[in-house]
Image (cartoon, rainbow, N blue to C red):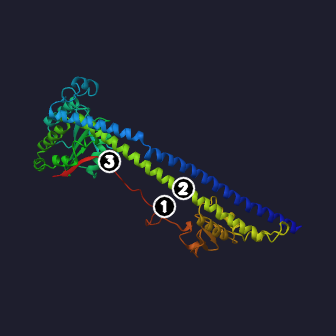
Amino acid sequence: MKTKQTSQDATALNQQVIANYQHLRRRSLIAAGLFLIAFAVSGFIFFKTAVNNTSYQNRLSDYSQQLNTLSEQRQGILDGTIEPETVDFDQTLEDNLANLKDYPSNEDSYQVPIDGTNITLAINRNNIFATDNAGILDSATKEKIYTLNKELAASTNGAQLMVVTLPDLAGEDIDELANDIFNQLGIGNAEESNGVLYLVAVDDREFRLEVGYGLEGTITDSLASDITEDDAVVEAFRDEDYNTGVNQVLDETFNLMNSKTALVDSNIARIEDELGTAKLIHWLLIISMLLLAFISLLMIVLLLRSRSYLKHYLQDYQEKISEANTARLSTSAIRKTDLFYILKSGLFLALTLQGIRRAVIQGRLLNTSGATAKGLGRVLIGDTLYSSDGTILTTAYLASNYNSSNWSDNNNSGSGSGGSWGSFGGGSSGGGGSSGGW
């Protein structure tokens, strides 16, 4: 009776080993088919993008024609043969800037906390472009800022020039703060990105001219630096004659923003930006499809090789148990075969030859009496911890750092609570412009 039960156990285990082998082969074939589809799709997209790219070439041609037309228009404006496009002043005020009427002498301020900073701005609803939180600007300068923005409203497509003064930076970096203020308030036209912010921190003796992306072609970083760090401007700030310094920066910046070709320059910058984006997407698509095709082909080769390699394990398994017929087949004989070790390891997909070898080693370790899996392919036998390739990681697992129960976060002396491991890194984005000091 015992012999019959042993034979039944051996037969069941044999069927389990063979079934696991067949499942591995089947999964490898399915994975190879999926990668074959990925290879075909990526190859097709690569061909359409890199070789038969008529659509892309037509887009480039359209952008080129637009840039040529705009460049000719710009030159004609400079030569005086073309009258620059303007927007009707009254219509602009009515449609877009209804609040920009005659300069209001009274102030009606509201508080705007700048996200992620220690700064809160008090902005005057009646003159949002002059935010003098440091109290250094006289009424004439504030009115001038208001008037310049009225002129920009009439002659440009929503360009805006804002001045913000602060007593100090409250520990903030002026470049990042200027960018935060600019983006949160939304200075300039949303589509054109044609705003400019002049930020002055009095006690920290720093200033920055932050330029919207749409005006970076007109007010380059070099020009912005020339404007803010002009000797006369710096000297005026050193003498605490802030209005003189601010007025000079306003005049030079406004002249660039309100040039005859400002609208054309803005359109040229927009088209060039779209052209650059189109080229970047085009080449990223080509590179990514080429990379995907290569990886897919590599995976197909690996999967097919692993299927062939698995077949050798099957042949070796069959040879080892062929000496015993089904009636005398023992579980102990089956448990000493590599194909059983693969079953024991729990290998889901035979992806590489090295992966199959590691599965055999891991299965052999797990087949040892008292062995337990500890995650990451590691196996614990007694107090010895093995990696998935059989390497001994430690012979004193219970006392080692591999044992999670030994992990602690007691670096803070006297603290009874745990902390956290690691930290996030910080980052920021910035537009064009220039920073300086006096």
* Disc number lying in front (2 or 3): 2
Quadrant of res 59: top left
Question: Where does the image place residue 82, in percent across and percent down from the top left?
Answer: 18, 29
Quadrant of res 346: bottom right
Query: Which residue is pictured at 54% across the width and 58% down the height?
Result: 298
Give the CA separation, mark 1 to mark 3. Answer: 29 Å
Q: Identity of the amino acid at label 1?
A: Gly
Q: Quadrant of the N terminus?
A: bottom right
Sort mark 1 into few (<14), some (14-19) or many (20+) by Cα contacts within 10 Å: few
* Disc number lying in front (1 or 2): 2
* Disc number lying in front (1 or 3): 3
- 35 left or right of 232? right
Q: Identity of the amino acid at label 3?
A: Thr
Q: Residue furthest bottom?
A: 395
Q: Secondary structure at mark 2?
A: helix
Q: Identity of the amino acid at label 2?
A: Leu
Give the CA separation, mark 1 to mark 2. Answer: 48 Å
Question: Where does the image place residue 400, in percent across and percent down from the top left?
Answer: 55, 72
Tell me the residue that label 1 is attached to: 418
Q: Residue furthest right?
A: 1
Residue 117's disc is 3
Q: Secondary structure at mark 3?
A: loop
Question: Where does the image place residue 435, in percent across and percent down from the top left?
Answer: 22, 50
Q: Earlier in the sequence, mark 2 or mark 3?
A: 3
Whether residue 329 is visible: yes
How many discs appear? 3
Query: Which residue is pictured at 25% across the width and 45% down the height?
Result: 210
Query: Which residue is pictured at 46% across the width and 51% down the height?
Result: 288
Tell me the residue that label 2 is attached to: 297
Q: Measured along the vertical axis of the image, is residue 399 above or below residue 253?
A: below
